Image: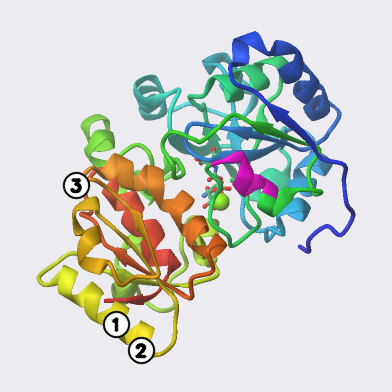
Amino acid sequence: MGITKERKKTILLPIQQADLELSKLRFAAEILQKGGLVVFPTETVYGLGANALDEKAAENIFLAKGRPADNPLIVHIADFADLGQVVADLPPIAQALAEKFWPGPLTLILKKKESIPDAVTAGLPSVAVRMPDHPIARTLIKLSGLPIAAPSANLSGKVSPTSAEHVIEDLWGRVDVIIDGGRTGVGLESTVVDLTVWPPQLLRPGGVSLEELRQVVPELELDRALLDKNKQEKDMVPRSPGLKYTHYSPRAKVVLVRRGEKQKEKILELLESYQKAGKKVGILCREEWKSYFSKADFLLELTKGSDLQQAAYNLFNHLRRFDQVKMDVIIVEGVAEEGIGLAVMNRLTKAAQEIV
Ligand code: TXA
Ligand code: MG
C-alpha cells in the first residue's frame, strides 16, 4: 500500500491530566467515531488510532504511515467487557495472562471475531489485542465506545515515537488529531504473545518480560524469528508479519557492540576508526563510561549502571536525538538480554547495520 499525499489539517491537543480535560478527550473520541485518525499516548509508545470496526478508517491508518497492508494492527480496549467485541473465544490461558498483566504492555494474539475487518488483521484469522495502561488512552477508548486499532504512530520503518514531538516529525498533516501527553513511560512497544498455537509463542519481546510471562505460562517459547540474526535460517518466514520488515532505523548507521570482554575498548576503536574516515560519531552508553569516550561528536546516556528499564525508556528517544544532531554513525553499548533487556537488544539488533 502507498502513502497518502493528501494533507490534512492536524489539531494538536496537549493533555496533562485525562480526568481534568475530558472535553478535549470527548472531542478526540468524536473524531474516532466519525472514522478519523487520532494519535494518543500509551504507556509503551504513541499509537495511531482509528475505529477497529470500520474498514475504511483502518485502511487510512496504513495510508498515513505508509505501512504495508500485510502487517496487521493491534486492537486496543479499555475494559475486559470489550474483549467480546474483538475475539471469538478466550482460552483459560488468555484469561490468566490478561488478569495478571492488563492493563499493561502485553498484546495477545487470539482467534478474531468476524466483525473485525480484514484490513485490521491483514486477512489473518487471528487478532492482536491489548488493554493499555495509560489514563489518556483508556479514557479516550472508553469515551469513543469502540475498540481502537492502533499501530505505533511513526512512519513505517522509523523508530516508534515516545513523545508528541516525534509524532509531529513523522505524521503532521497526515492525521486529524495528535494528543500530546508527554513522554511515554516504558519507551518501547508491548510484548506480543501468540496464543493461537501450542506451545504459545513470544513473537515480540517488549514491556512485559519473558521471565514474568513464564511465571504464568511456563511453556511459553521464543519464536524462531527472535533467534540471533546470524543464527536465523535464511528462508524462514516469521510468524508475526511485522517482523519481516526493517524496523527502528534512524537515518544514521547504527553499530551495536555486544556485551563481552573488551566491550569498552571495542567501542573506542570503532569510534576512532569512523572518525578517521571523516564520520560524525555519536555514542550511546552507560553513564559511567561517558568520560572514556570524550572524543565522540555527541554522547548520550543509555543507562546508569545496569538499569535496563532506563535503557528501554531512553532508547528510541535517543536514537531520534542522534538524527536531529546529524550524526553519521551511532555506536551503541549492548546490554544484558534479561528482563526488558531482551526487548532493548531485539530493537537494537534490528536497527543495527553492523553488530560486533
Ligand atoms: O506497544 C505497542 O504494542 C504499540 C502501542 C501503540 O500499543 N503498538 C504497536 O503496534 O507497536 P505495531 O503495529 O507497531 O506492532 C504490532 C505488531 C506487529 O509486529 C504485527 O505484525 C504484530 O504486532 N501483529 C498484529 N496482529 C498480529 C496477528 N494477528 N498475528 C501475528 N502478529 C500480529
Ligand atoms: Mg510499529
Residue receiving disc 3 = 306
Nearest the eye: 167 or 321: 321
In the rendered image, which quarter contains the C terminus?
Answer: bottom left
Is 36 left, or right, of 20 in this rendering?
right
- The residue carrying mark 2 is 276
User: What are the residue bounds of the magenta stretch?
Assistant: 163-168
Residue 191 part of the magenta-drawn span: no
Judged from the image, the secondary structure of the residue bearing numbered disc 1 is helix
Residue 158 point in image, percent of width and height:
58, 60
Seen from this angle, which residue lies furthest left?
261
Mark 1 and mark 3 residues within 8 Å of each other at the beta carbon: no
Residue drawn 27% across and 63% down?
A: 333
Q: How is the image coloured?
A: rainbow
Task: Work out whether residue 87 or residue 120 is closer to the camera in this orientation and state it.
Answer: 120
* Mark count: 3
Q: Which mark is residue 272?
A: 1
Q: Are marks 1 and 2 in contact (CB under 8 Å)?
A: yes
User: Based on the displayed image, in which of its 4 quarters is residue 272 positioned?
Assistant: bottom left
